[in-house]
């Protein structure tokens, strides 16, 4: 909860010494009782802890879910979630999974904060994508465009497109919402259909997740560069119309 976030150095979490109690996760089967400032929280499954100053601490996504469960003020929830992403602690999808698991996505103020979080995460991922192209010497693509066949159907939007090489990059910023796994599956099916359609037309689609951009920017640049260089060995792609979106 908040104590873990304080140890993770969240500026939007209250100082550790100001907290009335510290929540301690324990297995549901342990015969222990809360005492003093230590309040036990029983859990069916414990997360893998991170060691901070020698103390085993819940990872940020789990700590956020535990904290949000006790918070009713929308502004505080939004600040905590936003700091987690802006500070590079974790990706939005990991946070949403934990909030979903804790059944917190039915609370309106949490849903509003998650909508802001996903928009924030998307903006950060796009900024990293721009930086990848600039810092690693990739040719400048057409940014945020829609593709369609001439006089034909809409093929879908992509985040970056190199028309001469027929290479597209798409950020995968999906996150499960409201516990509706079927919705997540439907969205993934839509991603897969679009990718298959574009690749049948001879367009190479490189899928990149925000986590890969954060943790392995140089490696992702190499993947895109390889796709661009390999374009000369492929059959020419179908002509597509490129429109701003």
Image (cartoon, rainbow, N blue to C red):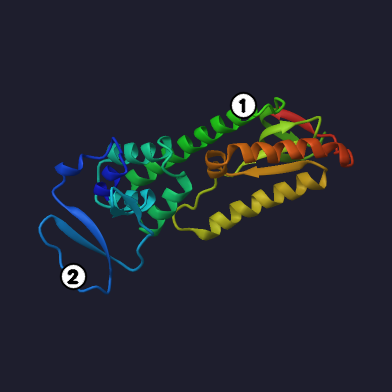
Instruction: Tell me which numbered mark, 1 or 2, is placed earlier along the sequence.
Output: 2
Q: Check disc 1 and report the residue beneath it.
A: 135
Give whichever of 102, 41 is nearer the camera. 41
Q: Residue at x 73, y 41 (%)?
A: 155
Give whichever of 54, 241 is nearer the camera. 54
Residue 71 on image: x %, y %: 25, 47
Q: Residues within 10 Å of mark 2 (few under 14, many from 20)?
A: few
Q: Quadrant of the C terminus?
A: top right
Q: Check disc 2 and report the residue beneath it.
A: 32
Give whichever of 29, 147 is nearer the camera. 29
Q: Nearer the viewer, mark 1 or mark 2?
A: 1
Give whichever of 16, 163 is nearer the camera. 16
Q: Residue at x 51, y 59 (%)?
A: 181
Residue 195 on image: x %, y %: 72, 47
Residue 158 on image: x %, y %: 67, 37
- Location of residue 242 with respect to 6 vertically, above or below: above
Quarter of the rendering containing residue 39: bottom left
Q: Residue at x 34, y 38 (%)?
A: 78
Residue 205 on image: x %, y %: 72, 43
Q: Residues within 10 Å of mark 1 (few under 14, many from 20)?
A: few
SS for tag 2? loop
For the question of whether residue 91 can be seen, the reply is: yes
How far is the residue under mark 1 from the one under mark 2? 54 Å
For the question of whether residue 157 can be seen, the reply is: no
SS for tag 1? helix
Q: How many marks do you count on the picture? A: 2
Quarter of the rendering containing residue 145: top right
On screen, residue 180 versus residue 75, left or right, reads right
Residue farthest to the left, as pictured: 36
């Amino acid at each position: 909860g908040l104590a873990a976030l304080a140890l993770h150095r969240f500026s939007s979490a209250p100082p550790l010494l100001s907290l009335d109690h510290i929540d301690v996760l324990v297995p549901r089967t342990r015969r222990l009782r809360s005492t003093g400032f230590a309040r036990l929280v029983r859990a069916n499954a414990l997360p893998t802890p991170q060691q901070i100053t020698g103390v085993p601490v819940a990872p940020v996504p789990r700590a956020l879910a535990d904290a949000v469960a006790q918070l009713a003020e929308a502004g505080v929830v939004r600040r905590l979630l936003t700091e987690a992403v802006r500070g590079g602690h974790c990706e939005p999808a990991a946070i949403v999974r934990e909030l979903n698991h804790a059944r917190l996505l039915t609370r309106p103020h949490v849903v509003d904060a998650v909508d802001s979080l996903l928009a924030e995460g998307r903006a950060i991922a796009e900024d990293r994508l721009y930086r990848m192209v600039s810092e690693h010497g990739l040719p400048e693509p057409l940014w945020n465009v829609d593709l369609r066949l001439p006089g034909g159907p809409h093929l879908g939007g992509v985040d970056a497109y190199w028309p001469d090489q027929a290479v597209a990059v798409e950020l995968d910023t999906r996150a499960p919402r409201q516990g509706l796994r079927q919705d997540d599956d439907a969205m993934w099916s839509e991603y897969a259909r679009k990718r298959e359609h574009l690749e049948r037309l001879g367009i190479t689609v490189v899928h990149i997740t925000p986590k890969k951009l954060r943790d392995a920017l140089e490696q992702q640049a190499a993947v895109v560069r390889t796709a661009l260089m390999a374009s000369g060995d492929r059959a020419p792609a179908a002509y597509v119309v490129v429109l701003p979106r």
